[in-house]
Every structure is written in structure tokens, then in C-alpha cells.
Image (cartoon, helix red, strand yellow):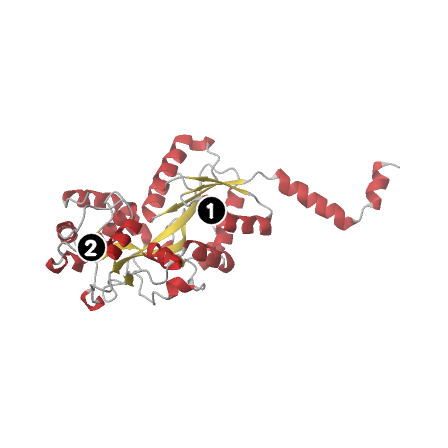
Amino acid sequence: MTVAQTLRRIPVSALLLTWCAVAAAAQPPLVLYSAQKEPFMRPMLDAFTAQTGIDVEILSDQGPVLVERLAAEGADSRADVLLTVDVGNLTNAAARDLLRPMDSSVLTANIPQALRDQEMRWVGLSRRARALVYAPSRVDPAQLSTYAALAQPQWKGRLCLRTSKNVYNQSLVAWMMTMAEPDEVENTVRGWVENLATAPLPDDTMAIRAVATGDCDVAVVNMYYLARLKRDDAQYPAAMFWPDQDDGGSHINILGAGVTAASKQPQAAQRLLEWWSGEAAQALLASNNLEYPANLKVAPDPILAAFGPFQASDVPLAEIGQRQADAVRLMDRAGWR
């Protein structure tokens, strides 16, 4: 029997399935440079692969490290997508031409304009609020109001902050600089430093634990750190307060991503971001990371919903990213280490 005769005996559906399997195998996997660790990301990437047939490899490290790696690798980089926390890292990557502009009606429909780069070199995939955590046994929430109010004398020896080297705090100060004169912001930061109960701490979880153990009464943290503690222990002795509700809303940052300039398969890379912006993937991402969806059609996880609704600042993240370097210099002048 000839090859042609053999092929005629094989059902067309079987031939199509075989062809699709060969085509999928021929496409190299996307390479994701991720500031989120693989256990967080793998369930979502496996779901993407199941729906599209496109495999995704992950290389995880801290955001600034990944940006420097992209820069060092240049056009030879295997990375197709950069996923990193904080608009400062994304702005840095875009300014160094490490990310390419995207043309996507899907992304513009799913992701609010304030959470996107003006040239669409990156988009936010989840929202994270910088909020206040306080000890309900020692602090009346009626005493709390704004970030800046924590510089007042009543909080002397009662405030915990993460180190100024952390990009979340740098973005917070950069955000404040979009709404107030630099001298005013610097005076606020000096007041925070004077009110510290301990030396600046290495991470937000340590700051929350310091509140819980009585080393301080209030801390400035990303909200998901408390959400994760509450997931493990619903009675954890710390509470959330949304600042600046009468002054433009709480500061918002993102987990965001862009297609790398070096990507050899930019269309597939953009497809991953578009898939990620959809409602099903947004719900999975927000639930896994305990962050707020960037797609406003998607409800937050019940643990976050229990923190109550809040007004979020609508200052464009791109504007915050552009002030990052000035914020770092201001923090240094104010003595925040």
C-alpha cells in the first residue's frame, strides 16, 4: 500500500489533530522573566497553555535584577515577556528601550488607561494599594486620615516603615510629589522618620508583625501582605485603613508586564498579556496573589472584599514612574534609610 493510500484511510479529524500537535510542538515556548515566583504563576500559565497550546518557561528574580539582565543580554535575550512589580521597574525598562509598544484593542478595552503606559509598552495586570495597618487594640481608626498625617507629633515613636530602598515606598513618595510641592513632601517624609518606633524594616510583613506585637501602632504597607496573614489566621491582630479617602484616594501601584524588545515571537507574547487581561485569568491572578484585578469587571477575592471598598487615586502610573528618581533623592535628603 502506498503512502497516499494509507493517508486516505486515516480520518480527516485525526490528521487535523496530528497537524495541530506538530504545529504546537514546533512553536518554541514563551520565556517569561518574572518578579513573581513560579509557585504563584504556574497555575495561570498552565491554564494559558491548556487553552492555547503555547508553553511558557519562567525565569524568576527581583524586578531590578531582571531589568538589568534584559539590558545586558540585549537583542540576544531569550525573554519574550517581562513581568514585574511596581511602575518604577516598568518605567525604567521602557525608558531603556527594553520593551516594545503594543497595538491591542483587547488590552485597551480590559485595562484602564491610568494603569497603562502612554505608548503601551507595559500594562498593569493587578492593582495593589499602599495602605495603613494599625493595631485595633491601641489605635482608634478615627485618629487615622492620610499618609501625610503620620508625620504629626501624635505618632512619635509609633510608626513603622519599610526601608527607603524599597521601590514601593519610592513610588509612594513619587505619587505624593504629583500632588504637592517637593518641600511639602520632604517635610512629611522628615516627620515620618522622626516618628519611627524602630529602624526601617526589611519588608512589609515584618512591619505588620511589629504592629501585632506592639513594637509600633501603625505601618505603611501593601494591602496584600495583611490579606495573606488573614488568609492563614482570620483573627490576626491587625486591621486595614484606607488613607486619603477625602484627598484623592489611596495610592495604587501594579503588577505589570510588557513584551520585550528582544522577543522573537512578539505576537504570542502579546497574546499572553491579552489572555491575562481577560476576566477568567484576572480572577485567578487576583485570587492567587490576593491583589485587586486590573480589569474592573472582575470582583476581588473575598479576603480583600472584607477590607471594604475604597477610593483609589487616579493619578496615571506613568507620571509616578517618571518622578521615581526625584523621589529617591528626596527620601535621602529627609534621612529615610
**Residue 125 can be seen in this image:** yes
Label 1 environment density (alpha carbons within 10 Å; few <14, some 14–19, many ≥20): few
Q: Residue furthest left?
A: 153
Judge whether 329 appears above or below 188 on screen.
above
Residue type, label 1: Pro
**Residue 112 can be seen in this image:** no
Q: Residue 103: image x %, image y %? A: 47, 50
Q: Residue 330: image x %, image y %? A: 18, 45
Judge whether 156 appears above or below 167 on screen.
below
Judge whether 135 appears above or below 63 on screen.
below
Q: Residue 61: image x %, image y %? A: 40, 39
Q: Residue furthest right?
A: 1
- 316 vs 30, left or right, is left
> Which residue corresponds to the image point at 57% horizontal and 48% vertical from the top-left?
49
| Proximity of marks 2 and 1: CB atoms separated by less than 8 Å | no
Q: Badge 1 is on which residue?
A: 39
Q: Residue 285: image x %, image y %? A: 46, 54
Mark 1: secondary structure: helix
Real-space Cα distance between discs 2 and 1? Answer: 32 Å
Mark 2: secondary structure: loop
Q: Badge 2 is on which residue?
A: 216
The mark lying in front, picked from 2 and 1, is 2
**On-image quarter of the N terminus:** top right
**Res 19 → quadrant:** top right
- 138 vs 23, left or right, is left
**Res 4 → quadrant:** top right
> Which residue corresponds to the image point at 18% horizontal and 56% vertical from the top-left?
180
- 4 vs 22, left or right, is right
> Which residue corresponds to the image point at 41% horizontal and 35% vertical from the top-left?
70
Judge whether 199 appears above or below 244 on screen.
above
Residue type, label 2: Cys
Q: Earlier in the sequence, mark 2 or mark 1?
A: 1
